[in-house]
Image (spheres, rainbow, N blue to C red):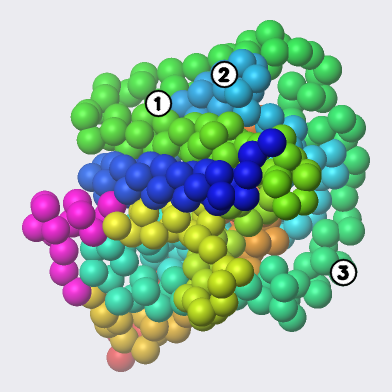
Amino acid sequence: MMSEIEFAALGDRVVWLTFGIAVALGVAMTRSRFCTMGAIADIVNMGDWIRMRMWICAIGVAVLGTQALAAAGLVDLGAAMYTVPRMIWLSHIVGGLLFGFGMVLASGCGSKTLLRIGGGSLKSLVVFIVLGLAAYMTLKGIFGVFRAGVLDPVAIELSPGQDLPSLLGGGPALRLGLGAAFGLALVGFALKDREFRRPELLLGGFGTGLAVVALWYVSGHVGHVEENPVTLEEAFVRTNSGRPESFTFVAPLAYTLELLMFWSDASRTVTVGIAATLGVITGAFIHSVLAREFYWEGFGSVEDTANHLVGGALMGIGGVTALGCTIGQGITGVSTLSLGSMLALASIVAGGVLGVRYQAWRTERMFAALDTA
């Protein structure tokens, strides 16, 4: 059995590997201008699908790689939070709508907030703090009472699990086949447009998807031990959920703030989610400095400040309620072929569309007022 010293060393290795993958992801997403909110806005406002194709490509690559890992027995997706038999469908819908609307008000989702911080945005730093606080209040505070008492109890049981391979009762071959069919269809759709086949866009699509797969491997295989030397139970080291994890950017922001506030508490450690959060900011900072794109950005008006505060709060509440964000559910969750993740993703997109239309309505009213003045 692994000793406590070896167990601690494994935890450090997992965290540093996570940080390295996250730095690479931060560089790739910054370089490619990866933005899920922007992808939705482009379609609603201009009918432009280029950035959406990048997101779809990332989902497809993540599905291909994640299902291959699971079929090979390298990662147990049945242990992930996205595939549990109990599907909290109302939480996915309500949380997804809130998150999608909030990300429009805040000028980007959780991952985009981290990228903007790396580029010098003080606006996004404020969003980070508000999002993290709201997420923590939804995890363990006042909003969590409503979530756990009203929304989460509305659920359906999908035994043995809510992911398609488990529901269809197949083995590794079926899992591999479903993953290949689903993933290749998405990647093929993205690559069909010649305009998408530019190096920076391909970097965003393939790089983001591969980063999700890599972190599944690190947390679910490298960090998996049959027996924790202290508890003698199966463990996935340094994950906040105690389960295999990949990239998600809502709850980890709350855990990052928590670690900073309780830094002197020796029981607190850097987890996979925290390392991923700090790594993406670092990667974005490195790219921004090297590309000479780093600049300080502040709020332009009281309305701008209010929008970002409300948007950050809605993302924190909605992301925890939906169990993820545009990356956490939209790519990581969907990579498990979870029905709940697909529902959450659809709700986030719907919330984003509502948010974009709301912003357009607000702009029209502003110009109408100016014309009549």
Q: CA distance from mark 1 to mark 3?
A: 41 Å
Q: Residue beneath label 2, please?
A: 68
> Mark 2: which amino acid?
Ala
Identify the residue at image location x=30%, y=76%: 122
| Residue contact between numbered discs 2 and 1, judged by CB atoms under 8 Å | no
Q: Which span is picked out in magenta?
A: 283-296
Q: CA distance from mark 3 to mark 2?
A: 37 Å
Identify the residue at image location x=40%, y=78%: 126
Crowd tier of the residue under label 3, counting other residues whose Cα lies within 10 Å: few below 14, some 14–19, many 20 or above = few
Q: Earlier in the sequence, mark 2 or mark 1?
A: 2
Q: CA distance from mark 2 to mark 1?
A: 20 Å
> Mark 3: which amino acid?
Gly
Closest to the observer, 16 or 128:
16
Rendered location of residue 210, percent (x, y): 42, 31
For label 2, the SS is: helix
Rendered location of residue 240, percent (x, y): 63, 56
Q: Where residue 312 is drawn, which disc sits there?
A: none
Rendered location of residue 130, percent (x, y): 50, 77
Q: Residue beneath label 1, please?
A: 190
Q: Earlier in the sequence, mark 1 or mark 3?
A: 3
Q: Is residue 78 left or right of residue 179?
A: right
Q: Residue beneath label 3, please?
A: 149
Q: Is residue 299 left or right of residue 318?
A: left
Q: Taking 268 as reference, is 1 above or below it?
A: above
Closest to the observer, 289 or 154:
289
